[in-house]
Image (cartoon, grey):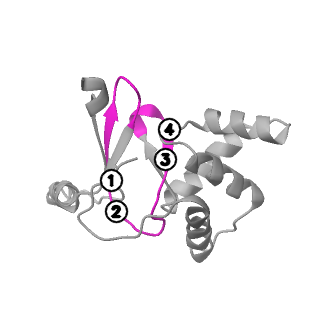
Amino acid sequence: MATKQNHSHHEHSGSDLVAAARDALVAAGEQWTGMRESVFEELACHERPASAYDIADNLSAARGKRVAPNSVYRILDLFVANNLAMRVESANAYLANTHPGCEHDCIFLVCDECGEATHVDDDTVSGGVRSVAKASRFQTRRPIIEVRGLCETCAG
């Protein structure tokens, strides 16, 4: 997942990412359970957006017992609400947030061919969207912008 930044934040990876996610969730007053850790670790392994079913299937295989997709959905919703994960709405799939605790709006460039979703941070664009909403007396919570097309590799 590539990222363009108009503000500074620390990108985490590997065990550092899991620790940052745990710290952010606990700081938000939530518990970091074994299942939540497993779901986050599995999500963080994916470079492309992963569905709750993908994650449930992989965890089921690793644990040797069925993990219900509904349980994974609830955990992913908690992660999104606490900025540990981002939801690609059009794909009904999720990406781990590589900088947990940093609040910003989501802009995704989604490839129709290979499914890659590039996350872009651009405060100018998201600020413009928030301004339009405010002018319409609409109170924003979390703008999400998705641009569909072809990534550089698929466009040839």
Q: Earlier in the sequence, mark 1 or mark 2?
A: 1
User: Residue 90, relative to residue 155: is it above or below?
Assistant: below
Q: Amino acid at mark 4?
A: Ala
Q: Does residue 45 appear to the left or right of 65 in the view shown?
A: left
Residue carrying label 2 = 104
Residue span colored magenta: 89-116
Q: State the residue position of label 3.
A: 95
- The reply to whether dot 3 and dot 1 touch (C-beta < 8 Å) is no
Residue drawn at (48%, 39%), measured in percent from left and top? 49
Q: Residue at x 49, y 64 (%)?
A: 12
Residue 151 visible in rendering: no
Identity of the amino acid at label 1? Thr
Give me the disc on residue 3.
1
Nearer the observer: mark 3 or 1; the answer is 1
In the picture of the structure, the residue carrying the numbered disc 4 is 93
Instruction: Give me the C-alpha separation between circle 2 and circle 3.
Output: 15 Å
